[in-house]
Image (cartoon, rainbow, N blue to C red):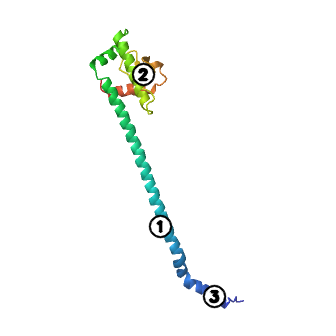
């Protein structure tokens, strides 16, 4: 038995077949183009936002570094006097500390506290010169032994740098 396809069904199929590119061209292609344009616009907009955030982050990092170096320069200026350095050397190297060295320690500790309080990015300041007893001047206490401090990472890093000769004496 032969199956008969209606003339009407065949005409619809032929019409659809003939007009498919017209339908695709008038509907699908514009939607695809608008979609691509929209995606490109979103990409450009987001890329601008990312660049803006990156610039802000870089500016914050530069400001942080500038602040750090300004504090470091001020601290180096404070220590610039040869007499002060000699007093601190005595504190670190000898078992006995004279009156002038104790006063120098007090002034240095007070200066370190003021530096710590002047910026929110500084938690504590340590002043260390290589010595047998591992004495450290901190912004919290005038003179402590490094082994008794809760923060041990910095001394380990410092000593490892000394071993690899990254630091000058």
Name the residue rendered at 33%, 28% in the picture. Answer: 74
- To which residue does mark 2 refer? 138
Q: Position of residue 141 (x, y in %)?
A: 45, 19
Q: Earlier in the sequence, mark 3 or mark 1?
A: 3
Q: CA distance from mark 1 to mark 2?
A: 60 Å
Q: Quadrant of the N terminus?
A: bottom right
- To which residue does mark 1 refer? 37
Establish if 6 lies above or below 52. below
* Secondary element at tag 2: strand
Q: Nearer the viewer, residue 128 or 158?
A: 128
| Numbered tag placed on residue 12 in the rendering | none
Name the residue rendered at 37%, 14% in the picture. Answer: 103
Establish if 70 lies above or below 38. above
Q: Position of residue 47 (x, y in %)?
A: 44, 56
Q: Nearer the viewer, mark 3 or mark 2?
A: 2
* Secondary element at tag 3: helix
Q: Nearer the viewer, mark 3 or mark 1?
A: 1
* Secondary element at tag 1: helix
Q: Nearer the viewer, residue 30 or 75?
A: 75
Q: Quadrant of the C terminus?
A: top left
| Numbered tag placed on residue 10 in the rendering | 3
Task: Find out whether the residues at labels 3 and 1 contact each other: C-beta distance under 8 Å.
Answer: no
């Amino acid at each position: 038995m032969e199956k008969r396809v209606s003339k009407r069904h065949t005409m619809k199929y032929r019409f659809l077949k003939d007009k498919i590119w017209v339908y695709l061209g008038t509907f699908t292609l514009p939607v695809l183009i608008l979609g691509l344009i929209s995606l490109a616009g979103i990409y450009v907009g987001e890329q601008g936002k990312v660049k803006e955030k990156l610039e802000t982050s870089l500016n914050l990092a530069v400001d942080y570094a500038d602040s750090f170096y300004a504090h470091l320069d001020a601290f180096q200026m404070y220590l610039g006097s040869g007499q002060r350095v000699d007093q601190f050397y005595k504190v670190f190297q000898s078992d006995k500390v004279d009156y002038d060295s104790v006063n120098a320690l007090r002034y240095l500790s007070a200066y370190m506290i003021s530096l710590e309080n002047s910026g929110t990015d500084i938690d504590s300041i340590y002043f260390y010169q290589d010595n047998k007893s591992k004495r450290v001047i901190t912004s919290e206490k005038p003179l402590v032994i490094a082994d008794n401090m809760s923060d041990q990472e910095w001394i380990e890093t410092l000593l490892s740098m000394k071993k690899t000769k990254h630091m000058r004496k």
